[in-house]
Image (spheres, grey):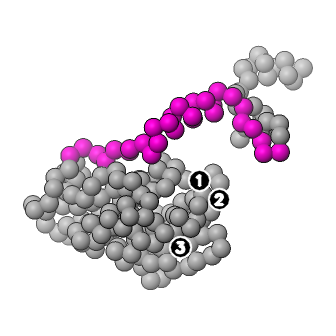
Amino acid sequence: MTVRRVVVDHVLFVVEDLDASRRLFTAALAPLGFGELHVQEDGVHYGPEGLDDFAIYRGSPVTTAAHVAFEAPGREAVDAFFAAALANGATPRGEPGVWTRYSDRYYAAFVNDLHGNNVEAVWHAPEPVADAPRRGGVPLRRRLNREAPRRARRRRSRPRSHPRGGVAPHRSGRTGGRSASGSARRRQRG
């Protein structure tokens, strides 16, 4: 069996609704042997006893489009992870099975959390898994809302509104939603 070295020390997802995300992750990670190890007003740490390697915290901007894979002790744990995640607000990304693109020993399931992050449970079987559904390709992201791309395009085409009025500053410090061309910046500087 392959000896695996820890590459990443810990992972943190920023979430909008801590209560809903906590319900999802607490239920989905329990079959994998991960529990709530440290709970604060604004966050929760998960892992096996003494190893709080994954955390969720309320904040902004939220984590989106990330992928995290949790090791499962067996095939049943992967199946239970998938069922618990779906029952608590996740959407399916890849149903439990052997993902042959990775290996004939790679039994996994994938879900989208409440912010569209790809959350996976994987069991690295000691032998090829022959009696499970075969999944080809890669798990695909399914849109959470068909209208989301249209709304996103509209938002990008006009400056963001600030809650107290006016225009919100861009991340770069400029106001408005568009960057000025080089000649426009030179005119602004005088």
Q: Magenta residues: mostly which secondary structure?
A: loop
Task: Tell me the residue at 50%/36% (across/down).
Answer: 147
Per the rendering, the mark at residue 59 is 2
Does the stretch in magenta take in 53?
A: no
In whole angstroms, how far apart are the C-alphas of marks 1 and 2?
6 Å
Taking the image as drawn, is residue 55 in sight?
A: no
Taking the image as drawn, is residue 15 in sight?
A: yes
Task: Tell me the residue at 58%/77% (across/down).
Answer: 39
The amino acid beneath tag 2 is: Gly
Task: Tell me the residue at 18%/61% (across/down).
Answer: 105
Per the rendering, the mark at residue 76 is none
Classed neighbour count for the residue bearing mark 2: other residues with Cα under 10 Å, few (<14), some (14–19), many (≥20): some
User: Which comes sooner in the sequence, label 3 or label 1?
Assistant: 3
Residue that label 3 marks: 45
Name the front one of labels 2 and 3: 2
62 left or right of 129? right
The amino acid beneath tag 1 is: Val
In whole angstroms, how far apart are the C-alphas of marks 3 and 1?
17 Å
Q: Return the x and y of residue 174 as percentages of the image width and height.
A: 78, 34
Classed neighbour count for the residue bearing mark 1: other residues with Cα under 10 Å, few (<14), some (14–19), many (≥20): few
Q: Return the x and y of residue 26 as percentages of the image width and height.
A: 45, 72
Q: Which residues are magenta?
A: 136-164
Q: Please, what secondary structure does the residue beneath circle 1 have?
A: loop
53 left or right of 173? left
Q: Nearer the viewer, residue 128 or 85?
A: 85
> Which residue in the rendered view is the most extreme toward the right?
190
> Residue 18 falls in which quadrant of the image?
bottom right
* CB atoms of marks 1 and 2 within 8 Å: yes
Residue that label 1 marks: 62
